[in-house]
Image: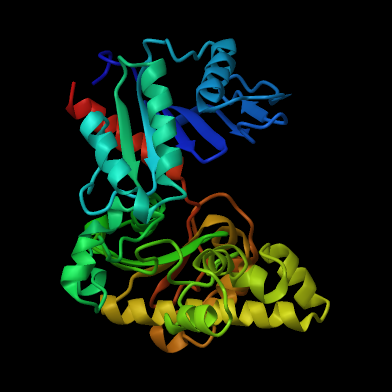
């Protein structure tokens, strides 16, 4: 597609009151600029812009930014100051992160009115995310109606799961009527990391089985066989699965009935409890793993128990996905906790030597922003740390799709 629409892709990640962005040049995947607009709609809105291509100073501004339209216009103005304006012929497309694509969207998709309508129909299963994602899409389309807008879905990578993994054991008529099934999330991260892990091993993705552990404030695991997801820990929503920063993860569904009937809690109160007041935060009052480790070192029993529960759930998923895959070539840790918390990696594989899993203490202690193997040379299964790059994955998928359509 060289020369037709340029080589740059702007990646937008729109939240309810925020707008994250990166501008990349796809000739070499280099970042030209990045930034964040937060507290949109408030008097204290803040824009932070980093001109990466020029190596200039970070620019910050505070003041009211009324809505996403004003936010994107402010971003466009900052990019123009660096000679990277949205009106540049070098801009090939805008790629948007969309959290929920249901079963309809299995790959990146050029946005049109029909696509917007389908994303809207999915709002009931993603009420916190899809409306904000749509706001970003509509704003960008209005600003650059001539430019391809591409939606890249968090759920798409997981649509390869077999029905045996994706279905819940409830009446299929009810499930289908209400779109109830396991969708999975963090798909762009799992796709990128599983592929990068194969590259780290010097092998093709289709020849490698990987367990990916995306451990941030939100956390999810996936079993990837030959480059295709066959199981993942998050389900209908991002609440299922691993213990997370503020989410409970796996829970007996009857707990909800008990809290409603015996505890007298409303559905909204239970929703808030499980999504915002549970996980590590609910267990010990902190959802920052660095602070939890500091408290553990100081003898804090609540922090120690929270860490043990977190690791116990990780071990269960590693073991389960080992069984699903049959053979495993690598376990890859990624995202904020996975990339930076050596004690989590060590504890997660401790006692799993019979499965061929171990970490080398010296390698595991090294801090780096590069993909690396932290297991001993003789280990049967590689334990890897692979920094995720969801923005690059979105840009790559966007650029590839626009190239096909030009």
Task: Please say which color scheme the image uses.
Answer: rainbow
The residue at 60%/70% (across/down) is 278
Q: Position of residue 334 (x, y in %)?
A: 50, 59
Question: Can residue 212 be seen by looking at this rendering?
Answer: no
Looking at the image, residue 246 sits to the left or right of residue 202; the answer is right
Q: Which residue lies furthest to the right in this view?
A: 298
In depth, the one of 200 and 15 nearer the eye is: 15
In depth, the one of 257 and 42 nearer the eye is: 257
The residue at 50%/74% (across/down) is 376
Q: Where is residue 175 in the image (x, y as percent from the top left)?
A: 23, 68
The residue at 53%/10% (across/down) is 83
Looking at the image, residue 96 sits to the left or right of residue 204; the answer is right
The residue at 29%/54% (across/down) is 157
Looking at the image, residue 181 sits to the left or right of residue 301; the answer is left
Total marks shown come to 0
Q: Where is residue 96 in the image (x, y as percent from the top left)?
A: 39, 35
In depth, the one of 112 and 398 nearer the eye is: 112
Looking at the image, residue 205 sits to the left or right of residue 21; the answer is left
Q: Position of residue 187 (x, y in %)?
A: 36, 53
In depth, the one of 119 and 332 nearer the eye is: 119
Q: Tell me the quarter of the picture where residue 17 sits.
A: top right
> Is residue 169 depicted above or below 270 in this figure?
below
Question: Can residue 188 be seen by looking at this rendering?
Answer: yes
């Amino acid at each position: 597609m060289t020369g037709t629409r340029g080589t740059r892709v702007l990646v937008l990640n729109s939240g309810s009151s925020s707008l994250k962005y990166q501008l990349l040049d796809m000739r070499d995947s280099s970042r030209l600029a990045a930034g964040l607009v937060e507290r949109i709609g408030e008097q204290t809105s803040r824009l932070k812009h980093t001109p990466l291509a020029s190596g200039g100073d970070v620019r910050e501004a505070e003041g009211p930014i009324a809505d996403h339209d004003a936010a994107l216009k402010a971003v466009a103005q900052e990019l123009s100051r660096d000679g990277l304006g949205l009106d540049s012929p070098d801009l090939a497309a805008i790629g948007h992160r969309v959290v929920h694509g249901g079963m309809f969207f299995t790959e990146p998709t050029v946005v049109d009115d029909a696509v917007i309508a389908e994303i809207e129909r999915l709002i009931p299963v993603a009420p916190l995310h899809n409306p904000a994602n749509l706001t970003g899409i509509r704003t960008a389309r209005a600003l650059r109606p001539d430019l391809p807008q591409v939606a890249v879905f968090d759920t798409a990578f997981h649509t390869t799961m077999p029905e045996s993994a994706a279905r819940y054991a409830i009446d299929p008529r009810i499930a289908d009527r209400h779109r109830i099934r396991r969708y999975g999330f963090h798909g762009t991260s799992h796709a990128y990391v599983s592929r990068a892990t194969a590259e780290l091993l010097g092998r093709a993705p289709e020849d490698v089985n990987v367990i990916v552990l995306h451990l941030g404030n939100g956390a999810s695991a996936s079993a990837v066989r030959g480059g295709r997801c066959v199981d993942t820990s998050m389900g209908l929503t991002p609440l299922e699965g691993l213990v997370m920063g503020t989410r409970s993860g796996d829970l007996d569904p009857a707990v909800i009935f008990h809290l409603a009937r015996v505890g007298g809690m409303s559905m909204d109160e239970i929703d808030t409890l499980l999504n915002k007041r549970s996980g590590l935060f609910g267990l010990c009052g902190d959802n920052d793993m660095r602070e939890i480790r500091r408290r553990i070192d100081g003898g804090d029993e609540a922090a120690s128990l929270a860490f043990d529960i977190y690791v116990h759930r990780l071990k269960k998923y590693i073991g389960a996905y080992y069984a699903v895959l049959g053979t495993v070539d690598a376990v890859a840790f990624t995202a904020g906790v996975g990339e930076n918390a050596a004690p989590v990696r060590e504890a997660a594989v401790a006692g799993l030597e019979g499965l061929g899993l171990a970490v080398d203490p010296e390698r595991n202690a090294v801090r780096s922003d590069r993909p690396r193997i932290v297991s001993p040379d003789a280990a049967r299964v590689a334990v890897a740390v692979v920094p995720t790059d969801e923005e690059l994955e979105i840009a790559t998928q966007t650029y590839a799709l626009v190239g096909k359509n030009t």
